[in-house]
Image (spheres, rainbow, N blue to C red):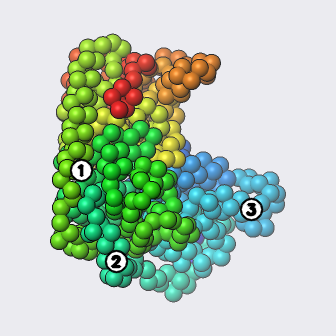
């Protein structure tokens, strides 16, 4: 019997474990929503397709299973493209299901341009796989394969465009089309991993470089085991400071954009480095290469990415990190300790920086407008160890949480990362709360970024999620304004009219609190974290405040 094609899409999604999808519905996608709803999956309304993609991306990061966003053709798909590209750079498994026009549609059709494959083409460079389906019988196999591609090897996003006529009409799909055997990751050979680790076993000054692949494999505990086996300093890329527990005595800080002095010392003086979960061709690998000596040995253990094999590393092993890393810990258990003088000099550098940050925080504690370091210090003191922070492009959600927050729980910093789009934190925080309602979530954002995603406060209210959004309100596009001042540019196009975000939050059904006195920061944070509703703290901050990395490092 013929059934709505949209219902077939919903069936495959639910059979693959999807319990909620993020949508901005149109007439092309209502049958999919009906099918999800009838099967018990939640259909969560975002207020913009970019935000739907961000929510799917965040769910993928936190669960390891693909988050799913659903859009209409044309502007629905293109609005989501930034969020999908962001998921690609974050190695986050997600699937964007979008309507597309029929292949025989006339030029300039509704939601189209002359080329009916333009969405497939647009998403191709920003996904692991981009495809369109115009045959109803191919819908199940294509969606099933999308789940395999999104989660195998290095995780990432997939775009599946489905003909609007399939989505909106009744179609005949044989039951056999829904049968599918999912692929599994293949571990590398034991000899390959053991051989790669020999450079670490024979070295005296050793360091670990731990990146996002470890987060995506949920393998930070294995990274800790390797670090403790080698008793060596650990460095993370700047955009993934949460890949290793920051309160561990071996953690030396991050490198990239603003380098922690202890991390610089660890990499510069090492004669062998084991890189975990970093693509050898990536920006993070380039950063590593730039901060090490010419004769250092670098061994990469990563999730595998075949299209960019070029590297001058000593050894590269690609495969399932959940298999590689425990085996590496076993191999290195008898490797002996790292050179004590080298290790202790790195640790002393880290301790000195910590002391200088404390002094800096004390010096600015009472100033008005409020110094952002006051916010970060209070937040670390009052929040749970496993609090999730979401961060934005710019100073409020990037520079400050990177410079001045201690991530004690891995995978607790969800950021727009190297793609660095603005407006990420509020939709990401909504998704994080839906994934784990009992965990504290704090969104860090500037006033410029908040103007791009404030509509998702409506989603927070609709879903009953109780995250805290901290708006560092300086009436500026602060990071760019600082660049203008520092480099002698005209100070234009970086002013923002003073916005009362507390009143805005109240108008959307959330609770808004304006904070202008530094002595009120800590109690406001404590009250907001204890609330059972979404709270926006509109904190007036000093646009001239210098980052920790510029002041101390």
Quadrant for residue 41, please give it: bottom left
In this picture, residue 224 sits left or right of residue 317: left
Q: Are marks 3 and 1 in contact (CB under 8 Å)?
A: no
Q: Is 189 placed above or below 241 here?
A: below
* Percent of width and height locating residue 311: 51, 65
Q: Residues within 10 Å of mark 1 (few under 14, many from 20)?
A: some
Q: Nearer the viewer, mark 3 or mark 1?
A: 1
Q: Which residue is mark 2?
A: 195
Identify the mark nearer the N-term, 2 or 3: 3
Identify the mark nearer the N-term, 1 or 2: 2
Q: Which residue is mark 3?
A: 116
In this picture, residue 137 sits left or right of residue 460: right
Q: Residues within 10 Å of mark 2 (few under 14, many from 20)?
A: few
Give 196 or 520, whichever is nearer the viewer: 196
Residue in the picture at 29% in, 42% down? 262
Q: Which residue is mark 1?
A: 342
Give 158 or 528, whichever is nearer the viewer: 158
- Which quadrant, please, contains the N terminus? bottom right
* Percent of width and height locating residue 90: 45, 54
The CA distance from mark 1 to mark 2 is 25 Å
């Amino acid at each position: 019997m013929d059934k709505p094609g949209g219902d077939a899409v919903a069936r495959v999604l639910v059979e693959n474990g999807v319990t909620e999808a993020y949508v901005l519905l149109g007439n092309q996608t209502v049958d999919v929503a009906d099918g999800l709803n009838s099967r018990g999956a939640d259909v969560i309304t975002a207020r913009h397709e970019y935000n739907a993609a961000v929510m799917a991306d965040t769910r993928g990061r936190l669960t390891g299973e693909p988050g799913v966003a659903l859009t209409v053709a044309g502007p629905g798909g293109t609005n989501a493209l930034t969020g999908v590209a962001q998921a690609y750079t974050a190695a986050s498994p997600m699937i964007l299901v979008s309507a597309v026009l029929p292949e025989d549609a006339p030029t300039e059709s509704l939601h189209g341009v002359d080329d009916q494959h333009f969405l497939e083409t647009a998403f191709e460079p920003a996904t692991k796989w981009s495809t369109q389906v115009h045959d109803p019988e191919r819908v199940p196999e294509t969606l099933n394969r999308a789940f395999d591609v999104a989660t195998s090897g290095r995780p990432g996003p997939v775009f599946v465009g489905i003909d609007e006529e399939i989505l909106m009409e009744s179609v005949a799909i044989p039951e056999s089309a829904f049968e599918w055997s999912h692929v599994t990751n293949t571990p590398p050979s034991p000899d390959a991993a053991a051989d790669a680790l020999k450079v670490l076993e024979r070295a005296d000054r050793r360091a670990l470089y731990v990146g996002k692949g470890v987060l995506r494999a949920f393998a930070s505990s294995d990274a800790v085991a390797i670090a403790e086996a080698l008793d060596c300093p650990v460095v993370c890329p700047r955009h993934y400071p949460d890949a290793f527990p920051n309160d561990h005595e071996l953690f030396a800080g991050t490198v990239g954009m603003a380098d922690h002095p202890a991390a610089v010392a660890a990499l510069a003086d090492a004669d062998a480095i084991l890189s975990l979960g970093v693509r050898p061709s990536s920006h993070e690998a380039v950063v590593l290469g730039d901060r090490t000596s010419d004769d250092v040995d670098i061994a990469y253990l990563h999730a595998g990415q075949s299209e960019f094999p070029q590297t001058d590393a000593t050894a590269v092993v690609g495969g399932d990190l959940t298999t590689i890393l425990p085996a590496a810990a076993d191999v290195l258990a008898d490797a002996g300790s790292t050179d004590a003088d080298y290790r202790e000099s790195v640790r002393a550098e880290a301790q000195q920086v910590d002391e200088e940050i404390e002094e800096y925080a004390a010096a600015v504690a009472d100033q008005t407008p409020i110094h952002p370091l006051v916010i970060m210090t209070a937040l670390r003191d009052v929040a749970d160890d496993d609090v999730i922070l979401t961060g934005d492009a710019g100073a409020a959600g990037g520079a400050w949480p990177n410079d001045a927050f201690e991530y004690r729980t891995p995978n607790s910093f969800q950021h727009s990362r190297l793609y660095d789009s603005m407006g990420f934190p509020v939709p990401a925080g909504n998704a994080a709360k839906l994934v784990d309602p009992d965990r504290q979530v704090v969104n860090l954002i500037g006033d410029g970024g908040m103007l791009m995603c404030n509509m998702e406060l409506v989603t927070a209210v609709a879903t009953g999620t109780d995250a805290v959004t901290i708006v560092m309100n300086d009436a500026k596009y602060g990071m760019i304004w600082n660049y203008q001042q520092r480099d002698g540019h005209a100070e234009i196009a970086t002013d923002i009219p003073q916005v009362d975000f507390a009143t805005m939050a109240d108008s959307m059904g959330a609770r808004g609190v304006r904070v202008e006195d530094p002595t009120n920061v800590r109690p406001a944070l404590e009250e907001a974290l204890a609330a059972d509703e979404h709270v926006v703290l509109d904190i007036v901050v000093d646009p001239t405040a210098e980052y920790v990395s510029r002041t101390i490092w």
